[in-house]
Amino acid sequence: MRQGGTSLLYQKRAVRAGYDMDILPSDLATYGAEAKTLLEDLQSRNERMFLVTMLVMNTAETRQKLENNVFQAAGIAQKYNCALRRLDYQQEQGLMSSLPLGLNQIAIQRGLTTSSTAIFVPFTTQELFMQGEALYYGLNALSNNLILADRKRLKNPNGLILGTPGSGKSFAAKREIANAFLVTMDDISIIDPEDEYSPLVRRLGGQVIDISPTSDQYINPMDLTLNYSEDDNPLTLKSDFILSLMELIVGGKAGLEPVEKTVIDRCVHMVYRDYLQDPKPEKMPVLGDLHALLCQQPEPEAQRLATALEIYVSGSLNVFNHRTNVKINSRIVCYVIKKLGKQLKKFGMQVVQDQVWGRVTENREARKSTRLYVDELHLLLREEQTAAYTVEIWKRFRKWGGIPTGITQNVKDLLSSREIENILENSDFIYMLNQAGGDRQILARQLNISPHQLSYVTNANAGEGLLFYGNVIIPFVDRFPKDTELYRLLTTRPEDLAEQQ
Ligand SMILES: Nc1ncnc2c1ncn2[C@@H]1O[C@H](COP(=O)(O)OP(=O)(O)OP(=O)(O)O)[C@@H](O)[C@H]1O
Ligand SMILES: [Mg+2]
């Protein structure tokens, strides 16, 4: 009211002195109008007033280039009706203020309303930047900020890395492994069907276990860990596991018949009888013992199973008919199964997965997390029983402090049954790299992503894509510097490897 009164007084005085309202300088009229809108914004449109300092930092290699850059920046600002002022004699303060220190030493400020200030801060981009044991996953493609995330804080830390061949899946897995090794205290196990991970694991001082017909390192698929909680019978899961192995062995589309399953389950319970009474390592059964028991069963199905198993016991595929003779004493272990043939490779993957499960149960007692990386995961999802066992292991992993990561180029295999879909639905972490057309549509439907978001996984370069972390979805870019020792350990590109030779 008082304000209104004063301005009225001034107006009256001006009129008395012979001024006309219309001949006020136009600048003054404009400023007056602007001030009025500002006041209105603040009073009725829930806007706030911010004092803002805008700094544009220019850098260059030489003085000449710097002058050019400054000139160019000023030109761009001018185009939008803004003037940039050079901070002569205040350059140090300018530099300090433009660093992310939360410290402004420059006294030049402008008042801006909320909506005007918002233009300078991209509030619409989603960020993922966590403290603590967070790992690096690239730069946010929209804001260029670091993406740092801790999978352990997800409801379900299980993860998938999906992408077409050469899109950088294994590379991303290796980068996360190196990062996790250095930042966390977690144990790390890798199932490596292509022998790509051993250089990194060796460099980190880890163990590389070669499983092949010519190697003398053995892993016994019959190994049984007794560290289960009371309500879980160790034999139940083991029996499931042996069933899935037998399915791989017998092969065929139909899988195992009910009678065959019964016979196997019966023999599994018998074969561990001695060991369970007196659990000494030298009493651990091997496949040969199971084979002998199968031979003794009266059913003709048992004979069929025994014959199928024979080649794995006394025949040319007897790699897995030995007691385990490798001692895991390193935090990071890579199981290389490249030299196993096609059929034996699935078998080997399954066996290693089961071994790691044993490790998870041991680590739980020590309150330690276990990370498992399974490259070429789709190999495990093709047979019904093997897939079912894998799904079961993945479900259990979470409860027991395991963090599994599956790496695959075959999205369709992930959706081939309700059961396997479980893996996709229960993976709160998905690192999605470039996708082929068909898979893109499937994923869009399954994960509910927009056409715009899809554009980040369409014809994307290696190391670019979409990151799903819980319900946060962020496009990322990870351009790993090539002149580093780490890059040389991670790359599998033939040119890079030839250069190293
Ligand atoms: N983020 C990245 N930065 C730089 N180079 C990368 C990046 N990701 C991948 N590359 C390059 O691309 C090559 C192929 O990547 P990678 O071996 O991970 O592919 P892939 O998706 O696992 O393929 P495949 O399905 O055949 O196993 C790497 O060896 C590396 O040279
Ligand atoms: Mg790969």
Image: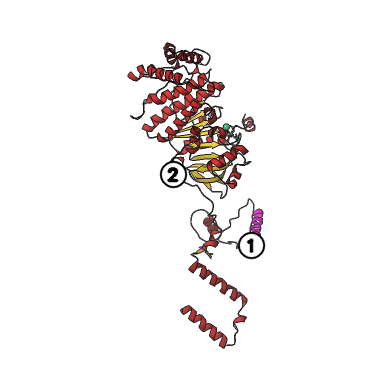
**Front residue of 388 and 278:** 388
The image quarter containing residue 484 is top right
Residue 476 in sight in this render: yes
Q: Is residue 64 magenta?
A: yes
Instruction: Name the element at disc 1.
Output: loop
- Residue 469 x/y as whole percent: 49, 43
Left or right: 74 as drawn, with respect to 134: right
Q: Position of residue 345 (x, y in %)?
A: 53, 23
Point 62% across, 76% down: residue: 26
Q: Position of residue 39 (x, y in %)?
A: 51, 70
Is 40 in the magenta?
no
Asked if labels 1 and 2 touch by Cβ distance under 8 angstroms, the answer is no
| Magenta highlight range | 51-77
Q: Amino acid at mark 2?
A: Gly
Distance between mark 2 and mark 1 Cα atoms: 42 Å
Residue 345, placed above or below residue 159? above
**Mark 2, residue position:** 132
Question: In this figure, which residue is indicated by the disc labeled 1?
Answer: 80
Relative depth, front residue between 378 and 157: 378
Above or below, comparing residue 492 to residue 276 in the picture: below
Position of 70 with respect to 95 (left or right) is right
Of the numbered discs 2 and 1, the one sitting upstream in the chain is 1
| Mark 2: few/some/many CA within 10 Å (<14, 14-19, 20+) | few
Give the amino acid at mark 1.
Tyr
